[in-house]
Amino acid sequence: MKVEQISVFLENKPGVLEEVMKALKEANINIRTLSLADTSDFGILRLIVNDVTATSTILKARGFRVSRTTVVAVEVPDRPGGLHSILEALGGEAINIEYLYAFVEKSGENAVIIFRYDNPDRAIEVLQKKGFSVLSGEKLYSM
């Protein structure tokens, strides 16, 4: 139930993000969700895409520094308190959240929150035991 995410380290200058998007468009890579964080010198673009291997290969060939990380996708109803319900379920389990980002499904009824945990296997175990829907990579890539 883990999901592979691509992280791309980008120079913080005009046109760099467009270059990445152009490369993915030309390769017919579909982005399911993304997050972009920056500092004064560089940014980290995190992507969930329909083809992780092709994305990694294409971007590395264009000179980008790319890494693959494991994240966990949790589906919750899109309503106030959705995120809190996940955090509450993990309370007392000593599982650290390193970062997260989210998107709303096309139906608008559910949200998917992407988590990077320090212990993803334990987080998945706890969340499933408490009735949360943890999405597989295949399901997320096809949304």
Image (cartoon, helix red, strand yellow):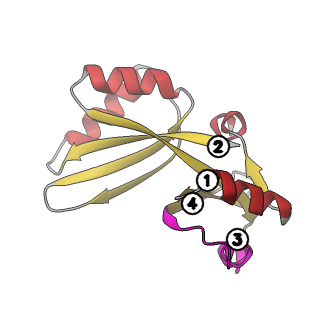
- The range drawn in magenta is 79-99
- Percent coordinates x, y for residue 64 in the rendering: 25, 32
Q: Nearer the viewer, mark 4 or mark 1?
A: 1
| SS at badge 3 | helix
| Residue toward you, 62 or 5 | 5
The residue that disc 4 covers is 102
Q: Amino acid at mark 3?
A: Ile
Mark 3 and mark 4: Cα distance apart in space? 13 Å
Residue drawn at the location 52% of the way across and 32% of the way down? 30
Q: CA distance from mark 1 to mark 2?
A: 8 Å
Disc with the residue nearer the chain's start (4 vs 1): 4
Cα distance between the residues tagged 1 and 3: 14 Å
> Which residue type does callout 2 highlight?
Lys
**According to the image, label 3 marks what residue?**
86
Whole-angstrom CA distance, mark 3 to mark 2, is: 16 Å
Whole-angstrom CA distance, mark 4 to mark 1, is 17 Å
Q: Earlier in the sequence, mark 2 or mark 4?
A: 2
Q: Position of residue 108 (x, y in %)?
A: 72, 60
* Magenta stretch holds residue 86: yes
* Residue drawn at x 43%, y 19% as measured from the top left: 27
Mark 2 → mark 4, Cα distance in angstroms = 16 Å
